[in-house]
Image (spheres, grey):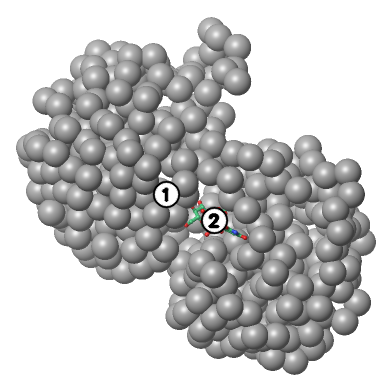
Amino acid sequence: MDRLLITGGRRLSGAVRVNGAKNSALKLMAAALLAEGTTIIENTPRIVDCLTMAEVLEHLGASVAWEGSTVTVDTSGARGLETPYELVRKMRASIVVLGPLLARWGRARVAMPGGCNIGSRYIDLHLKGLERMGAEFSYEHGYLEASAPDLHGAVVWLDFPSVGATENLLMAAVGAAGTTVIENAAREPEIQDLAAMLVEMGARVDGAGTTTMEIQGVDAFRPIRHRVVPDRIEAGTFAIAAAATLGDVRIEDARAEHLDLFLSKLADSGAGIEVEPGSIRVWASDRPLAVDFVTLPYPGFPTDLQPQMMALMAGGRGTSIATENVFESRFMFVDELNRMGADIRTEGHHAVIRGVERLQSAPVRALDIRAGAAMVIAALSADGISEISDLHHVDRGYENLEERLASLGAELRREPSLWPAAV
Ligand code: UD1
């Protein structure tokens, strides 16, 4: 277990490159299961979650090799059907192999994900949709046994545009007999990336990026080479870090069109924003103005940038209100921010953030990936030396974060933790 020691008050400046999107790469790796042979996925972040997905694929009999940020998945030996609890508990997104396994082999055995730090995260929408396509499920000893000898197309209405459910259904539908329509589908850029890869593999998918997706099942898929879309959440995290430290940072390989609402909120807070082809420059010369924001499925304000934006608003001029509509318990990190002198009160899915002039350094914990990023941002702008423990959460989602921040002028170092991991 590592901790990060950050000396606050350094302005970030210079250029930083965004990696491939974690939330896309994980699903693209799972999609490789659909084709026999070697699929090559470029621009894959070498983060703990992607390494866990590699373990999931290996457990299923595939071979996975890394060269820099290129991952090669060879499925010639893949015959396994089981994703064990030890991997699903490390990463809930492991459940996304369900769709491709059912499409290719008609069976799967996947451990049920347990709770996590940001809400209960059910998989009922995944299962209801797959049931409509002919899959049957039973539960045994913590495992979900899935069987779909005759997976067929169906019209599926999602109660909520769940990212994971849309992806699982999409990956099942591409190999099911007939036509599937997903209504109220999630529209995230990562879903568009997955659909683009599946089409390259031979799938027939219409409407990716809209609320209605129509998929014609096909019999076979070819292994291909695909490049992961840049990570909009990582880009947003650097943008907020630049604003919070009154810095000036060029974020390269960032796709501004995936961050429209977020960037307009950041501009409302007084930050300067310059969008150029393939990069976004963000700077700030004064404490941010208070801005209200409401998380919603894409193209709304991303829930994965809510904690970081709260960290920015914690040092803002005035009072802002954040409303979290996607995950029920995504304010748990607020107590950590308050330990740094923030003045935030939560009530249900609203948070009232009374901006303070300066956050104070303190020892704090990273409670999950994005809450950890929020702590890093708070520490970068606070006075004194902060210590962020439970850094493994941050490592799940950000590759070499401290080196990249150091290259922008941050003063920070990683050290082994002095404390046992908190429970
Ligand atoms: C994905 C992202 C995560 C992001 C989230 C929302 C990955 C690996 N993770 O998570 O970073 O924060 O999208 O943009 O891509 N729900 C149900 N039943 C279901 C499925 C979901 O009730 O069957 C609920 C969840 O509890 C949650 C909400 O729907 O409250 C959103 O979940 P979902 O969009 O599925 O998020 P994930 O795919 O888990």
Any mark on residue 23, and which?
A: 2
Q: For disc 1, does the CB lie below 8 Å from ligand 1? A: yes
Residue 143 is left or right of residue 22, and the answer is right
237 in relation to 403, above or below:
below
Seen at 54% across and 52% down, the residue is: 22
Q: Is residue 84 left or right of residue 174?
A: right
Label 1 is placed on what type of residue? Asp
Q: Nearer the viewer, residue 119 or 365?
A: 119
Badge 2 residue CB within 8 Å of ligand 1: yes
The percent position of residue 88, horizontal first and vertical second, equals 73, 44
Q: Secondary structure at mark 1?
A: helix
Q: Are marks 2 and 1 in contact (CB under 8 Å)?
A: yes
Name the residue nearer the viewer: 299 or 136. Answer: 136
- Which labelled disc corresponds to residue 304? 1
Residue drawn at the location 57% of the way across and 18% of the way down: 422
Quadrant of image for the N terminus: top right
Q: CA distance from mark 2 to mark 1?
A: 11 Å
How far across and down, in percent of the image, does residue 46 sit?
A: 58, 44
| Left or right: 11 in relation to 330 | left
In the rendered structure, which amino acid carries the disc numbered 2?
Answer: Asn
Ligand 1: quadrant of the figure: bottom right
Q: Is residue 308 above or below residue 252?
A: above
* Secondary structure beneath label 2: helix
Q: Position of residue 192 (x, y in %)?
A: 51, 73
Q: Which numbered disc covers residue 212?
A: none
